[in-house]
Amino acid sequence: MTRKTKILGYLQQAWLVLVLACAYGGALAGVQISLSPRIAENRRQETYRIIPQLVPGAEQEQTVELLISDRHGNPARVYQTRDAEGQPNGWVVPAKGPGFADDIGLLIGLDPPLNKITGMYVLDQRETPGLGDYIRDADFQRQFRGKAADTPIEAVKADPGEQQITVLSGATVSSSSVCEIVNTALANVREPLLQEWARASAGADPRDEAEAAW
Amino acid sequence: MANGPTASERFLNGILPENPVYRQLLGMCPVLAVTAAMLPALTMAAATAFVLISANGIISLIRGQLRPHLRILVFTLTIATFVTIADRFLAAYLYEMSKVLGPYVPLIIVNCLIISRCEICASKQSVRVAVADAVGMSLGFTLALTSIATVREILGSGSWLGIRVLPEAWPNWGIMVLPPGAFLVLGLLLAAVEWWGQWRAQRMDYAVAPAMRGQQAQATGEGMEEANSWKA
């Protein structure tokens, strides 16, 4: 059998699969393009709703969205939270990274000089139901509150120390992934955020610059 | 192969006589996982119905072109596409509910109910019959999910569809909203349906002539043949 007839034979067998794959791919692209702005908006609204829980005293309406470039020069979106008087009182950093099943999306609350983590929230997860989805648990997320923001956090099985959190057996990979995502995100945005903070303390309003950047 | 059950037979069979959950024991994952309350159960039933009806319709349309050894691949491809559409749609328009259902929406892909309908009905019969079959099966699946969710939500939270139905003094049975509650309710309802089916069959036996019994036996045999016909 020549090579050509062989290929034709394959096509004869598989043309339906190929045609369907292309058609379905196109349909999914269409769905993704038309729905993704709405999904992103839903996520943003959830983020704003959670912000007061992540930074004590933060006002939802006062929050300013900043586009900074992180350590590697990649653009990153962060939220500068403000209290009722409009004074900056913390940061909320969105972070994303690989979990056990799929990417995990987090929100990390920080105090203005980046000394302590003030809160952590799991925005997006598809971990194993009943095991890995334990990271949605408030008890798990509360462990991050008060941890130092300049040293990496470790996940341990038992007897957590200063800078450690306890993982639940059955959710080891998921909870360690969350730690890893938090550590990476904080390392990435630490310098730019400190610069922003220094500038804010000096009196400049980042809102003006954010607008200028747009 | 040409003459399977008619559209109306397919439709009616799906609801009770061949109910996907109570008679075929298919799709147990969502049955156990999302039935703690009515709203998630209904959303799951609607998403499954959308996928099942679309997949059955499309498979039936292309049934003449299916290659036997590639058919499962085509089924899975079709089902996965519609599940992704359902998942994105929920995330866009029912965001809170999509967070509650979490990974169970993508898991519709592996709901055996859908692929078994593609295999048994849609790949052999006309679009009309396939859609009737899908609608019947979806109704049967909805019936099963909602019956379990009704028991669990009323006993576990004292409400139905979020509306309070039991007095405030009702001590919510925590176990009902937890996974063991799903197993307990499913087991009891399964037993009840089986018991009712046997009772009915017994009554039929007394009521109808022996000739009728012969026909029934044939009907059961047919189902087996149908399932094996791909091997031929």
Image: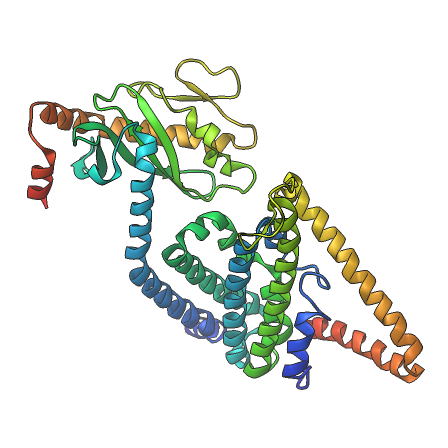
Q: Residue A28 sits in which quadrant?
A: bottom left
Q: Is residue B221 above or below residue A91?
A: below
Q: Residue B219 sits in which quadrant?
A: bottom right
Count of numbered badges drawn on the protein: 0
Residue A68 pos. (x, y %): 17, 36
Residue occupying image coordinates x 46% and y 74%: A16
Residue occupying image coordinates x 61% and y 75%: B133
Residue B123 showing in the rendered view: no
Q: Is residue A182 above or below residue A130?
A: above
Residue occupying image coordinates x 71% and y 61%: B22
Residue occupying image coordinates x 29% and y 31%: A185
Residue in front for this viewpoint, A152 or A77: A77
Residue in front for this viewpoint, B6 or A209: A209
Residue B171 showing in the rendered view: yes
Q: Is residue B138 above or below residue B96?
A: below
Tell whether B135 sits left or right of A175.
Answer: right
Residue B218 pos. (x, y %): 82, 79
Residue A61 pos. (x, y %): 22, 40
Residue in front for this viewpoint, B225 or B110: B110
Residue B215 pos. (x, y %): 84, 82
What is the basis of the colouring in this image? rainbow
Tell whether A172 sits left or right of A117.
Answer: right
